[in-house]
Image (cartoon, helix red, strand yellow):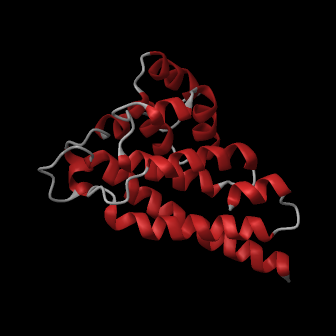
Amino acid sequence: EAIKSATSITQTLSGELANAQRNLLAIAAAGGNSNAGNPLVSQLSNGPLTHLHEMPEAHLDPTKELARMIAEKKYEEAFTSALHRSDVSIVSWLCSQVNLQGILSMKPCPLSQGVLLALFQQLACDINKETSRKLVWMTDVAVAIIPSDPTIAMHVVPIFRQVSQIVDHLQSMSTTSASETASIR
């Protein structure tokens, strides 16, 4: 019964996270466009992610293109592309290829607040895989998020609540190690 309940909670949260992820990507797409009245309209018409919608859905190896972007120090573009795929394994791969803490400590941070919030959320989606690494990345990203930033302000609380529910559930599981429990706290 506990497993069924946990599975149900996980499925519900995954669906909510997927919907919120799509909204965040729309916000990230509208990013620095202060003239954008509606981020979704901006994304679809002339936002920075327009070229991503034109890309073929099935790339054989997206890591090659992401590696090129990293080499060119196009971190915002690389993370946006990885997040757009809604594939946590690609996002995790990208995080493992860069010095995420170093990127986040750059002034100004090369990742927009929308990308940071989407990254935080997406890493939580699949927290049961590579848990320790993801908790470190999530902590670093959470510190870099500026909740008062107008591009994300209305989404911060709901997303942090969702992520909190996910990590609280993780913490309550008997398989969670003491070090992971400390990181969760």
- Residue 8 point in image, percent of width and height: 71, 76
Instruction: For residue 44, say whether it is visible.
Output: yes
In the figure, is residue 27 to the left or right of 3?
left
Give whichever of 10, 136 is nearer the camera.
136
- Residue 75 point in image, percent of width and height: 43, 29
Which residue corresponds to the image point at 52% horizontal and 61% vertical from the top-left? 18
Instruction: For residue 61, say whether it is visible.
Output: no
Q: Is residue 8 above or below residue 152?
A: below
In the figure, is residue 48 to the left or right of 92?
left
Which residue corresponds to the image point at 38% horizontal and 35% vertical from the top-left? 109
In the figure, is residue 133 to the left or right of 119?
right
Q: Is residue 55 above or below residue 16?
A: above
In the figure, is residue 182 to the left or right of 38?
right
Give whichever of 150, 23 is nearer the camera.
150
Give whichever of 37, 176 is nearer the camera.
176
- Residue 164 point in image, percent of width and height: 60, 67
Which residue corresponds to the image point at 47% horizontal and 31% vertical from the top-left? 103
Quadrant of the frame with the N terminus: bottom right
- Residue 98 point in image, percent of width and height: 57, 27
